[in-house]
Image (cartoon, rainbow, N blue to C red):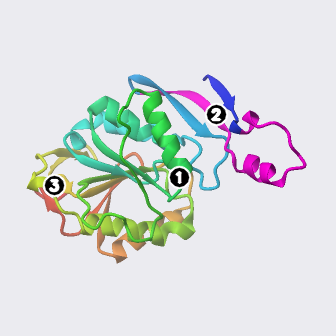
Amino acid sequence: MDIALFSPSSLFPDEDDTSSHNEKTEAQQSYEERRHEFPGMELFIREFSFHQLNANLLWPGTFAFAEFLVQHRSWIEGRRCIELGSGTGALAIYLRKSFCLDITTSDYDDQEIEENVAHNCRANGIIPVLPHIKHTWGATFPITDPDWDLIIASDILLYVKQYTNLIKTLSFLLKSYKPKDNKAVKRMEIEQNGEAGVGFPQPVFLMSWRRRIGKEDESLFFTGCENVGLEVKHIGSRVYCIKPRHATVSGDNI
């Protein structure tokens, strides 16, 4: 894996006697450029050397989830998608390049995150860059009529204290969904426990993670989802489908 370290602060000369310069250099980010292998392609991703919100690195769940979605590509093709906790934007970039997926990135209300996602889009040939929404979980969502019928995320359950805020955002996106141009999602099949079940809900949240969290924390998140009227189903290796209890389905309920 190739790594190159870049620090914007190196562009400024040493002026220790200037407090304004010190404040400026302390505010500068440093980055690491890495090549990452995704199924069928290599992406060049710039990552923060450090970020207080953990938006700096690609976590194991990103690659595992990418492989899972490749194996179930019919679940996402033709969908309008938003990713929560996009971080570097790598998964969204991969899905756009692999499936021409209509996808929007989203993360904490932080300008550096948005700019880094845009940088990574351009570095991997996505121009114009993917649309991005700055949103802090639990805050009022900047779009009142969300029309994403697929929401995805990977490795976002690290901070237990944020579960309530995450569930609030997720509940809004799922329950306030309004189809774009009234286009119906095509009939799909899912496989669960070796048996085919028909119908894929719209809207739906697909989530995967590989970072270890305790069973109590896991249960806390899923119970919180159920308490606000969401239904949780395990559909694969640490992949979960979360939908409103009365979601529109093309076929029978899953």
Mark sitting on residue 180: 3
Q: Quadrant of the N terminus?
A: top right
Residue flagged by tag 1: what amino acid is it? Gln
Task: Tell me where residue 253 appears, x and y as whole percent.
Answer: 15, 59
Which residue is most to the right? 17
Q: Which residue is mark 2?
A: 32
Sequence-wise, the earlier of marks 1 and 2 is 2
- The answer to whether marks 1 and 3 mark residues whose Cβ atoms lie closer than 8 Å is no
Sequence-wise, the earlier of marks 1 and 3 is 1
Residue flagged by tag 3: what amino acid is it? Lys
* Cα distance in 3D space between marks 1 and 2: 18 Å
- Neighbor class of circle 2 (other Cα within 10 Å; few <14, some 14-19, many 20+) is some
Q: Quadrant of the C terminus?
A: bottom left
Q: Which residue is mark 1?
A: 111
Q: Going 27% across and 33% down the picture, which residue do you hit?
A: 99
Span highlighted in magenta in the image? 9-38
Q: Residue 133 colored magenta? A: no
In the picture shown, does residue 144 fall above or below 40?
A: below
* Cα distance in 3D space between marks 2 and 3: 38 Å
Q: Nearer the viewer, residue 137 or 133?
A: 133
In the picture shown, does residue 172 fall above or below 24?
A: below
Q: Horizontally, is 254 left or right of 184 in the view? A: right
